[in-house]
Amino acid sequence: MKKKFASSFNAKPSPKNTGALAMMAQKAVDEFDILPELQKFIRPHREHEFEQLLENIRNEGVRDPLVTFLLDGRKVLVDGHHRWKAIQQIQSEGARVDYSEKNLDIQTIDQAKDWMIDNQLGRRNLTEAERTYYVGLRYNHEKIKDAKTQQEPLGKFFRTGDKAKEIGLQNDMTDRSVRNAAQYAQGLDLIGEIAPETKEAVLKGETKIKKADLQAIAAGKVAPEAILAKTQPKTDPKTGAPENQTTELRMPVKDRVIQQGLSNEEVKKLNSAYDKTEQVIRQLIKSGYPKAEIRWMLSQAVAKTKK
């Protein structure tokens, strides 16, 4: 049974990792350490997802435990960041929130990163960009760990073929696709250093950057700024105002309907139909046809495909 915890209750962290589900009183402020170096291993929430999470917690409480591990006596949060943010918001309104904690039996930051990446890859509602990114992160992180172990320049003794094949088997990808994903992730991280909002939009499926462009950034063939310039809206030479863009409408159909339960064959049909009508959509936007109406028509097409 979960206990109810007031935000003013003082609790001491468990002295060691037990791997068991810990039911303990929590403070609403500064209870967990959230390390900046773990931020990129956290899947960003879409606005509507966070609003839904708030509503669920208000109505049902927190069903899943917040996952932590102990590092130098501090409790570091590795899963449940969005739940924790929602808990803090609700408690700041004066309400009590029921929640529990699970302590992982791990000792290092590297182990935490491995766990977080695998946890993200286990989600069923990842966009194509997110899955590619996390597979690439997994491979790149293995290279970094190997470099630390060997005390040599990055990757000198790393058996790239073996590790790429292993990660590929785990994620239904070829070893070549895994290495391409690694460059994709590296390039997107470099984009994120300059424009974090663009990186987040790419992962959410709201903005599209070609894989080849991100791989070129990773290989040092092109500067991130040059690729970022391609994603900026063009301006009307007469008025200086942004021209209507089709970025949102042109994102892969798979990313737009991934949470609607369509099969691979249905997605292929939608992609094929979308390719044939993209020019028409562009013309509609150029002529001033409301984007909201176009999105509505697309949603109706998706609904018919599911019937």
Image (cartoon, rainbow, N blue to C red):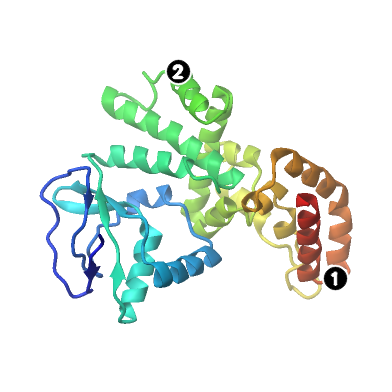
Can residue 219 be seen from the camera position used here?
no
First in residue order: circle 1 vs circle 2: 2
Can residue 168 be seen from the camera position used here?
yes
Q: Amino acid at mark 1?
A: Tyr
Q: Amino acid at mark 2?
A: Asp
In front of the other: 145 or 236: 145
Location of residue 8 by image quarter = bottom left
Q: CA distance from mark 1 to mark 2?
A: 53 Å
Give the number of the disc on residue 69.
Answer: none
Counting from the top left corner in percent of width and height, residue 276 is at 87, 47
Counting from the top left corner in percent of width and height, residue 247 is at 71, 57
Q: Would you say 5 lies left or right of 55 here?
A: left
156 in relation to 74, above or below: above
Q: Residue furthest bottom?
A: 94
At a point 70% along the width and 39% down the height, the residue shown is 264
Q: Which residue is mark 2?
A: 162
298 in relation to 117, above or below: below
84 in relation to 15, above or below: below
Quarter occupied by the N terminus: bottom left
Q: Would you say 304 lies left or right of 173 here?
A: right
117 in relation to 62, above or below: above
CA neighbours of label 1 inside 10 A, class few (<14), some (14 to 19), many (20+): few
Q: Would you say 130 lies left or right of 148 here?
A: right
Give the number of the disc on residue 289.
Answer: 1
Q: Residue furthest front?
A: 1
In front of the other: 227 or 42: 42
Counting from the top left corner in percent of width and height, residue 33 is at 25, 57
Q: Would you say 286 lies left or right of 187 here?
A: right
Disc 1 is placed on an element classified as loop
At a point 53% along the width and 60% down the height, the residue shown is 197
